[in-house]
Image (tube, rainbow, N blue to C red):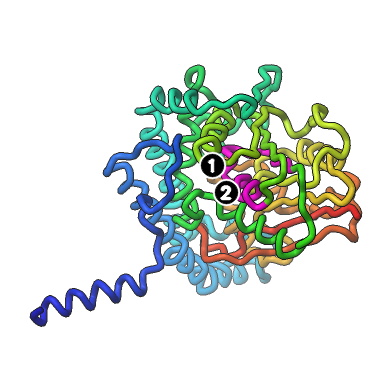
Amino acid sequence: MDGSDASTEFAQHSLEDTYDGPPDQRTGARHGIYPDLSHDEVERFNFLAQMNRHLATRVAPMVETAWNARIEPRFEAEHGRKPMDRTEARRALLTDPVFQTWSALRRMTMEQRQEAGRWAAVRQSEALAAKAASLSAPDRLTLDPTVAVPRYVAAVDHHCMPGSYHTELFPGDVSGPASYDSGIHVTVGGRGGPYNDGIGRTMAEWIQETYPHFKPSRILDLGTTTGHNLLPMARAFPEAKVIGIDIGVPVLRYGAARVESLGVGNVRFLQADATNLSQFEDGSFDLVMTTMFLHELSLTSMDAIFREAKRVLAPGGLMLNMEQPAYAGMPPFEQAIRDWDAHYNNEPFWTTLHSLDLDDHFVAAGFERDKLVKKVFTVPAGPAGQTKIGMVFVGAEK
């Protein structure tokens, strides 16, 4: 080996040792209903994941620097005080080119992520529908044509996703959830885990560590989507009967095929509106869970869901919800940055949810205040440079 070869090898090893960016999407695990991606489709996802990470780790800090150096001082000079809340902070940010650049690039990346996933899924939509049908198993999926899609879902393309979670292009279609499943890699900068189940694994591990004697035999996941965060719970408690519900037929159909291909036998999917769980008797479940679901509701529906969750919980049961943390106690700048999704990412309930004291809403639903537990998990930076990914609320009945 000559000197140039040694230098090249050293540089390659140094890069491998220091690289902490998104993994190549090809390293992710594949299941039986996952869309087939061409070389160019994979590389487009990889580019967009890198772009999201760049915006989080390089550009977002520049926004904060601009805030401290000139945006907040300019506001203070004009008003004789600092911004009082996120609304004033956001209005000040809107005038600055650094924030404008970050915001525009972030929106563009989200739109391109949806375009990339949608194109890859739609071009093979019939093949994916056939796969879903071939993976159908008795009692794995129960659909109810009487379930109506509520307006707070039907009126919004959540996080720029065409048709949100519920739209079918044709009978048997699963292209929407296929796009969702393949594109999460971009949205979270490659940090969702090989099966996009990082939140579910975190929740399952937390329950096992915090409540080592808790062995739920019946688990209900509300707003399950494709069931990607439900599977870790089903695997953690293999003796449990596990049900995931959603209003969206395509995501349920895709989730059932996904679970079947992965060989997880204790999971069923059911079409239902979580505001009305009348098909389940009182005390039917030991664990009721949601993952990043509450911010896509409405205030009325959220309160109804909490009441129903309380009703179907068995004595000693837990309700577990993973969400981004509330704004209370955050400085106006951080609130304004976190509130970006409400204004530019089609999340109309985002601001309201994160402004609430959810404890009051759990108590109003019948949970006891002294049995609510909060846990904030800290993870590496997400697409907005945020480090706190979520807060767990647990309602426990002894």
Labelled disc at residue 159: 1
The spot of residue 197 in percent (x, y) is: 55, 50
Q: Residue furthest bottom?
A: 3
Circle 1: element type: helix
Magenta residues span 219-236
Residues 270 and 66: in front is: 270
Circle 2: element type: helix
Q: Quadrant of residue 386?
A: bottom right
In the image: residue 21, left or right of residue 191: left
In the image: residue 298, left or right of residue 20: right
Give the Cα distance between marks 1 and 2: 8 Å
Name the residue rendered at 48%, 21% in the picture.
Answer: 169
176 relative to 235, above or below: above
The spot of residue 73 in percent (x, y) is: 57, 72
Query: The residue under label 1 is which amino acid type?
Result: His
* Residue 157 visible in the shown view: no
Name the residue rendered at 72%, 63% in the picture.
Answer: 375
The spot of residue 46 in percent (x, y) is: 35, 52
Residues 197 and 268: in front is: 268
160 relative to 126, above or below: below
Q: Is residue 221 located in the magenta-colored stretch of the structure?
A: yes
Query: The residue under label 2 is which amino acid type?
Result: Asp
Residues 31 and 298: in front is: 31
Q: Is residue 263 located in the magenta-colored stretch of the structure?
A: no
Residues at circles 1 and 2 in contact by the CB criterion of under 8 Å? yes
* Residue 273 visible in the shown view: yes
Tag 2 residue:
341
Q: How many marks?
A: 2
In the image: residue 134, left or right of residue 272: left
Which part of the image, by quadrant, shows the C terminus?
A: bottom right
Within-10-Å neighbours for mark 2: few <14, some 14–19, many 20+: some
Labelled disc at residue 285: none
